[in-house]
Amino acid sequence: MLSLLKKTIGDVNERRLKKYRKLVEQINALEPQIEKLTDQELQAKTVYFKEQLASGKSIDDIKVEAFAVVREAAKRILGMRHFDVQLIGGLVLAEGNIAEMATGEGKTLVASLPSYLRALEGKGVHVITVNDYLAKRDRNLIGQIHEFLGLTVGLNLPMMSPEEKRQAYQADITYGIGTEFGFDYLRDNMVYQLSDKVQRPYHYAIIDEIDSVLIDEAKTPLIIAGKMQSSPELHYIAARLAKRFQRDVDYTYDEETKATSLTDTGIEKVEKAFGVDNLYDLQHQTLYHYVIQALRAHVIFKRDVDYIVRDGKVLLVDMFTGRIMEGRTLSDGLHQAIEAKEGLEITEENKTQASITIQNYFRMYPILSGMTGTAKTEEKEFQHVYGMDVISIPTNRPKIRVDLPDNVYATKHDKYVAVVKEVKKRHEKGQPVLIGTTSILQSEKLAEYLDQENLPYELLNAKTVEQEAELIAQAGQRGRITIATNMAGRGTDIILGEGVAELGGLHVIGTERHESRRIDNQLKGRAGRQGDPGSSQFFISLEDDMFRRFAKEETEKLKQKLKTDETGRILNKDIHEFVDKVQRIVEGANFSMREYNLKLDDVINEQRNVVYHIRDKVLKENDRLALIIPMIQSACNQLIEKYCSEEQIPEEWDLEALAAELSNLMYPEQISFTRPLEDMDEVKEQVNRVLDSYIHHLENWKEHEELQTTLKQVMLITIDQNWIKHLENMTRLKEGIGMRYYQQEDPMRLYQKEGFELFTMMYNTIEREISFHLSQLIRPFMQSHTNE
């Protein structure tokens, strides 16, 4: 069954490639004709293509000739000619899909083709790279082709001024890192003048290393935060308390989902420590938040794995790249909880003002495409979340790297001893070895084993990031041993030294299976680039995190029937099948978690879209009074519901209080109710009479420029203040939703339901506050008008 499925998938990929090869033949057929063009004639093609599109031709109609033009421009400007496989990659991207291309196949040059084609539509193209260095490099290199052909090319970097960013976004093609594009989106939706926005509507994006951006970084939302007061003392007390907690006595911890929760015993300890009766009372919500964050800091976040401490500061480590995430801090007091755990000075807590996940940001692009060396294993997720297919592109030269079977050991010690033995054997003949580890802790542990054998090595992890480029560049030199965390993977070329190819090329050793085959494949891909010789092998143990976290019971059962040789290597025939099975379980669990988190974010994403849409209307609309009138009508209905409950008889309604609030809301109108009133309809009839008069009164002020300007500021401030409060409420709701038990109601449905209720409350508050502010604002204008 599995082989049939693989064959079917393979056939689909091959059918797509067959279609692209026919187009490549057409592009190649045009080459002699395009070569004869002068520079001016070649450059004139850009104007010609734009005219073709304006006259009704489609992108597909001009695609073949446009690709031929870009190839010729690249030859003349850079001395580089696109290979046929690079043309195929460009065709895949132009259609809004993912091109899976092996390391070293020239993905940077591939992007020059679809970015030119889609830029001809005049709606902007965004080329997303994984770091600033690559954005600058690619803009300066590939930008030469596009500028030669008459297109403008921009660069979007952090710390640029709004004016510089606006110019970058106005360019035909804009380079930058994905997070900065996302932050600009959030900042654009916090401005108080329409002219302060820097972005234009989204059209088409190419994401380099798309799996890293859309899958690995998907767990970390983009957050713009402001400082807020927190209690350092409370953080320290909560940290000391969390340190004394015992697992499965005071708290539970699911290693698979990394979810923590207090047990009844733990809750009692907290209540006793702080002298409170019920930790879950609304008045103790803040205390509960401090304690649960302290617990997470102690249980989930490990020093030298998830973060390092440098110069008295907690610096976060990217678990996928091993790099320090400069300037990034955890929100909602979690960063402060880690500082308290480490006994450091507590920094100010961040309060979220705007946020969006990477997934929901990039889903706003009508056409999205990407490149990577490793995407096929996550094809289902790309199709499900983004509607993109993954097309595997053949290599320009045959791949000759040898991927050896895993060596699996019973213990970590046996594994490390075996790794050192293998490194020593290859080092003695001069073959360079790159050893990949999953954490700083693991890399330093392995270094100790190498020290015992007096083997020279270079250690590359988040603590030594400054030397990264230099160390990796040298990793393919004769006799070199390099230990690296995941950071060694991307954006860095390893060139083989003289005579190394004859020794078998670079040998890569993995010391632990990652939580995804994709990351393992990235590590393997460091060897055997562009048809070079090379090899790879993984050394793993049943004590590795993957087995401990995701298959504890199955691993214990397996240990009962282990057969090992004298080195501790497991000889059981089914061991490789077991390892693959556990890794697939991990991949499934992580996919489910990303899917679940996306569903959670979809709730707030819909709310965000509503709020940002209202903000945009306030910014763009000249007659803001027209926007407020429905709000006033809603505010009146809310007050009627407040003072005239349908559950009460009319005699019990508080009409005096209703009249006072309505008169305050609709200055200078005055309202009073004469009893007896038969039903609610009579109340509404009287209110609507006064409301109609008030609205008619407001019509006189439509053209008052000063009032309209002031009103815009007040409306935006009111929306923003309530949205920030709402984001905090939604965070608390998400935090506590799993702790509560509702029969026959799953947490997701509960979050959706209560999130909608919170949003409705926030929206009602905005309507009331804006209506009241208008009443206050208009008084001085009316009074001065009356005095005149």
Image (cartoon, rainbow, N blue to C red):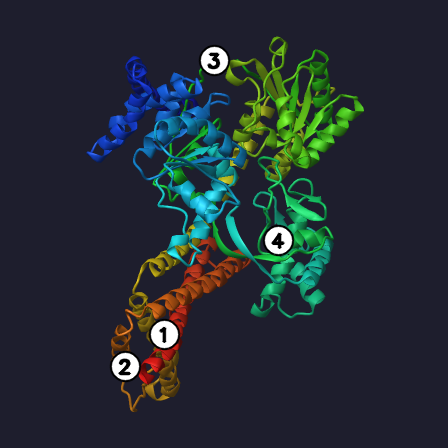
Mark drawn on residue 638: 1
Q: Quadrant of residue 36?
A: top left
* Amino acid type of the residue tagged 3 in the rendering: Pro
* Amino acid type of the residue tagged 4 in the rendering: Leu
Image position of 364 (left or right of 525): left
Image position of 458 (left or right of 648): right
Mark 2 lies on residue: 690
Pick the residue in front: 78 or 391. 78
Residue 595 screen position, x and y as percent? 46, 44
* Amino acid type of the residue tagged 1 in the rendering: Gln
Mark 4 lies on residue: 334
Q: Residue at x 70, y 62 (%)?
A: 233
Compute the Cα span from label 4 to label 3.
49 Å
Mark with earlier residue (4, 1): 4
Mark with earlier residue (2, 1): 1
Query: Of all residues shown, which one is farthest toward the left?
Result: 55
Pick the residue in front: 640 or 209. 209
Q: Secondary structure at mark 4?
A: helix
Image position of 148 (left or right of 479): left
